Every structure is written in structure tokens, then in C-alpha cells.
Image (cartoon, rainbow, N blue to C red):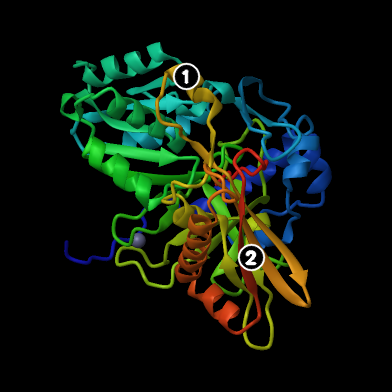
Amino acid sequence: MPARRRRDTTIGRDERQLLLLNATLSHAVQHTPFYAERFGALTQPLTDVVQLAQLPLLSREELESHSLALLARDRVPVTVAMTSGTTRPRPLVTFRSAGEGTVRNMLFASLAAGDQPRPLFLHLVNAGHGFDVDAAIPGAFQVPLERWFHYQAVLDLLEGSYSFPGFASRVGGLAGALRLLKALTVLCIENDVDPGRFEIALVSSSSDHLTSRWRGILSSYWGAAIDDVYGLSEVPGLYARRCLACNHFRFSPLAVVERLELGSDAPASGPIGRLVATSLFPLAAMQPVIRYDTGDVIEVALEACPWHEEPGFELLGRASQLVVRPASTSGPSRVLLSSILLNEVLDSIPDIAVSEYGFTRGLGLKASIGLQKWKLQQSVRDGVPDVELGLELRWSPREHPGPAEALRSEVRARVLAARPALGRAVDEGGYRLTVQLHEPGSTDFWALV
Ligand SMILES: [Zn+2]
């Protein structure tokens, strides 16, 4: 494919985004008690998107504790959604009004080129997270995957031939959280389902980090292109897909994104930064989300993109799960290790125990799929930062000391090789990396990546 520069024609970092941002702010101040109090002094519209940085940040704790004061008084919710409280004591409940999904619908409609039929999608949904009004788009079949009959319904829907006006006759896309795609794919493989029965051209994975091993499994079974999507359900419009030209993530123009320093609230000076996002009106009109500190850290790609003026980015993971070398005279702060990187390395090591996904219990899977049981811990020993990676194994390291020692060295070598900056820091004696192996069933480790 010849390299060509394509201008971003969507609303991005220009007057249209500024217009929507001012609409977002004025709606929030006029209709929600929370923002009326917080931005009360804000009387003039912003004249540049960068002025957004003058407003205070919104933390996850505030979103939880002020969720009712954040609701707009001029709307009625049609749905609530929740993000799991697996790493926190309570789930986060968010409210959505009618009409917010309309923007998504229009976007999807605009994806269809000219008079080409629009694609039919099968969207695997997690019924446990509430009904997703934004995902109710024409031509997308939403199906849960928690019971054997759900699986049979999925196969029927994928095999069906339809004649909806303006749409393709077969389901051509499969979308959903990676854990659901994994369960469906493994079920099909275990039951000898011939993928030739389907016409899936695109598999779009979200919610969980897609490792290269799983990308390979999905691609070889479905014979489809694999798309990888990043977003947070509590921030409507915060949505990134991989660029077809450079393969890095790019944000949709439906949210304003900022990158802040890891250790302060100043704009990031280097490529790495904490992601702060603002949903643009009319998204999140029911519960405005302005300067939300997502807790996720991204790294801007070093190489330029042939299609876009700005480079794409990669997700590094939760700020709380990063090993960061602080800024010093020798340079800016650097990420030495992240949960995403560890997931990529450890996903292909079958010796690590797995905590099975609860939703798979009613599916009759033979293989065990779930979250790997590992944990990254940091401390300081004799003045040297100590990074300890704990792994719970499927077999007893105490009873098999030889294989345990070999595995420990292999894991350590693979982690060091995956992030050369960590390798150098360890070689120079500035950091220590140890791998601890634990007996089956002895830990509460849980790698939610
Ligand atoms: Zn690109």
C-alpha cells in the first residue's frame, strides 16, 4: 500500500472540538449541582482546548461519591451501567439518558461507504454489567455468553442469512470483551465447529489487553482481521482503535484527551503520561465527565504515522501497576515495567495458574480460561528498588525444584528482554528483579489487565 498522508477530517483538536467542549462545560454548569459548584466562576467560553487544563481534575473516588450530584437535572436516565468493583470495594454505577446512543448510531452509519451494504455484527455482551444503551445499534445482535443455549444461539445467528434493508446478508463482524471472544473461540474449537460455516471478516476485541498469542489464536480460527479497541465504560466517547497505517492506537474525536505527568498534574513533557479525558456533549449529557483522571498511562509512539500528523500511542496499563524510574539529572522519568508488558510476556507461559472467569461456569468448557495468577510488588531493600514478580503455578515448585529453577530463570530473562530499559537499570545495579514461585492455591493473586 503506498504511503499517503490523510488529513483527519473528523472533529479533532480544532474549532469543532472546541465548540463541543464549550457546550459540554455550559451544560454541566447549568444542569448539574456538582459542576455548578465546581466551575461556578467559569463564565466565559474557552477560546482554546488547552485552556481545559485550568479546570480541576475529576477522580474515580469523586465519580463514586458524587454520582448523584453529577446527574443533569434536565434528563431522565434510560439505563445504568456498572464497572466491576473487583479491585475496589464497590462497583461504579453510571447513568445514561436517551439520545446518547444516537451519536454512536450516526458514527456507525457514517462508517458504511457510499451505497455499500452496512455490516451485520454479533456483539457478545456481559449481561452482568447492565444493558448498554450505546451498544444498541442497528444491525448489531447483542448476545450474552453465559449458558450453553447462548452459545447455540450465537452459532445460529452467525450461520443465518438475512435481508435487512441496507445491510449485508451474513454476520461479518464479531465484537466484544476479549474474555467473551476467548470463551466463544475455545468453545468452537473444543466442539469441532468448522469456521467455514461463518463469514466473519473482522473480530473486534475490547476491555482486556489483547496479547499477541491471543491475537494469533483469534486470527487463525476465524480467518479474520483482528481489531483491538481501548475505552473506558465510565467515559463515553473515550475510544481508541488501531490505525491501519501504523498499527498504534488513535483516539476518536468524541472525547478530549490530555496527558499529564505521572508524578504531578502538569502536562506531560515526555512521551509517557497519565490519561485524562473529557466526554464531549451530547455524550455523557446525563452524567458529565470532565477532566476524569482515568488512572491509565499511555506512551506516545516514537515513529511517525504515514496517514496522520500526530503519532499514535500504546497503553501501558494502570498507573498503580507501573515500575517507574523517577526523573533525575540523567533524564526524564521512565517506565521500566508495566502490567501490559508483563501480560504479553506471561500469557504464553502455561505453567502459571489461572483464576477461571466466573461466567464460563455454565458453558461446559473443557479448557480453563481466566486471569493468570501473578502479582507485581515493589519495595526498597538496602537502598535499592526491588521489583518482585510473584507467580502461582499449576504445579508444586517445592516438589519440583529443578523445573522451578529453570522456569524462574526463563521468566526473568524474558521480562528483562522485553523492556530493555529495565534490563539496563538492573545491569547498572539501580534495580533488582526477582521472580518468586508460589504453590498451587496458596495466593490471592489476580492479574486484571
Ligand atoms: Zn497511524
Rate crowding at label 1 as few (under 14), some (14 to 19) or many (20 or more) other CA atoms within 10 Å. many
Q: Residue at x 73, y 53 (%)?
A: 57
Image quarter for residue 79? top right
| Secondary structure beneath label 1 | loop
Q: Position of residue 212 (x, y in %)?
A: 37, 52
Q: Position of residue 426 (x, y in %)?
A: 59, 77
**Kind of residue indicated by mark 2:** Val
The relative height of residue 259 versus residue 126 in the rendered view (above or below) is below
Q: Position of residue 359 (x, y in %)?
A: 52, 24
Q: Looking at the image, in which quadrant does ligand 1 appear? A: bottom left
**Kind of residue indicated by mark 1:** Glu
The relative height of residue 146 versus residue 26 in the rendered view (above or below) is above
Apparent side of residue 417 relative to residue 34 in the rendered image (left or right): left
Cα–Cα span, label 2 and label 1: 36 Å
- Residue that carries the numbered disc 2 in the rendered image: 323
Apparent side of residue 268 relative to residue 161 in the rendered image (left or right): right
| Secondary structure beneath label 2 | strand
Report if residue 12 is visible in the image: no
331 and 336: which is toward the camera: 336
Image quarter for residue 307? bottom left
Image quarter for residue 183? top left
Apparent side of residue 129 relative to residue 369 in the rendered image (left or right): right
Please give the label number shown on residue 146.
1
Give the total of numbered labels.
2
> Which sits earlier in the primary sequence, circle 2 or circle 1?
1
Q: Residue at x 40, y 26 (%)?
A: 366
285 and 1: which is toward the camera: 1
Q: Residue at x 74, y 32 (%)?
A: 90
